[in-house]
């Protein structure tokens, strides 16, 4: 395991990215300074540090502009506001998500925090037919973007599903969220964040 250096300095608790996929051994040090295993769908705050072992990989997605970084170990880095700062090891492979995605992904941290607190995200249900034409067009466009993201992503990367989750959730189309959540749970059955999202939109 690469050394991450001294305990993290205090920093503002600002969510800047999401962990999209993890394989092998990857450690995360947040504001508490205690190393923990990185988890899929965990929120990344500015200043958080990661260490990826020689056989590990980690993908993080920045919320501001959809920058995706895939780190292959050995490597270590610190999360910035829109990109990571390499501490040691290999540079990441960098890709960009479609321009329409970051705005929707930026809603995910609050959804995860609410779900982790036990708050139900399911409220008064709407149907697609109740939406105005422009909103229906936006949803159709989101489906197309999702299909492209899914085709380009590795199987365990749930970024496409988190994006698709955030769009109908914003329109209170809760029935449409259930298959999306089921797909995320299948891809990441051990993610606490995904399980919390699933509970938050389950039928009362």
Image (cartoon, rainbow, N blue to C red):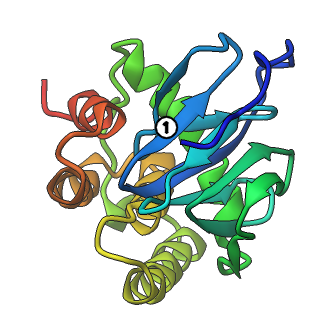
Image quadrant occupied by the C terminus: top left
Q: Which residue is mark 1?
A: 42
The residue positioned 22% from the left and 60% from the top of the image is: 187
The residue positioned 45% from the left and 87% from the top of the image is: 152
- State the SS at label 1: loop
Of residue 126 and residue 169, the one placed in the foreground of this image is: 169
In screen coordinates, is 94 left or right of 28?
right
Percent position of residue 191, x then y:
29, 39
In screen coordinates, is 29 left or right of 117?
right
Percent position of residue 63, x then y:
71, 53
In screen coordinates, is 100 left or right of 59?
right
Percent position of residue 156, x then y:
31, 65
- Name which quarter of the figure residue 48 lies in: top right
Of residue 172 and residue 70, the one placed in the foreground of this image is: 70
- Compared to residue 149, the image places residue 139 above or below, namely above
The residue positioned 74% from the left and 48% from the top of the image is: 77
Of residue 6 and residue 135, the one placed in the foreground of this image is: 6
In screen coordinates, is 66 left or right of 73?
right
């Amino acid at each position: 395991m690469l050394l991450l250096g001294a305990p993290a300095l205090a920093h503002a608790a600002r969510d800047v990215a999401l962990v999209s996929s993890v394989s092998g051994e990857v450690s995360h040090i947040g504001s508490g300074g205690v190393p923990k295993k990185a988890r899929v769908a965990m929120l990344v705050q500015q200043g958080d540090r990661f260490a990826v072992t020689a056989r590990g990989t980690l993908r993080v997605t920045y919320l501001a502009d959809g920058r995706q970084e895939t780190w292959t170990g050995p490597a270590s880095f610190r999360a910035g506001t829109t990109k990571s700062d390499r501490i040691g090891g290999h540079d990441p492979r960098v890709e960009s998500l479609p321009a329409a995605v970051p705005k929707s992904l930026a809603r995910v941290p609050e959804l995860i925090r609410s779900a982790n607190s036990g708050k139900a995200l399911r409220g008064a249900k709407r149907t697609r037919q109740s939406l105005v034409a422009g909103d229906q067009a936006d949803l159709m466009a989101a489906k197309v973007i999702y299909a492209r993201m899914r085709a380009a992503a590795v199987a365990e990367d749930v970024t496409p599903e988190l994006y698709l989750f955030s769009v109908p959730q914003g329109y209170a189309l809760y029935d449409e969220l259930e298959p999306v959540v089921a797909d995320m749970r299948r891809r990441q059955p051990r993610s606490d964040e995904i399980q919390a999202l699933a509970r938050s939109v389950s039928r009362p």
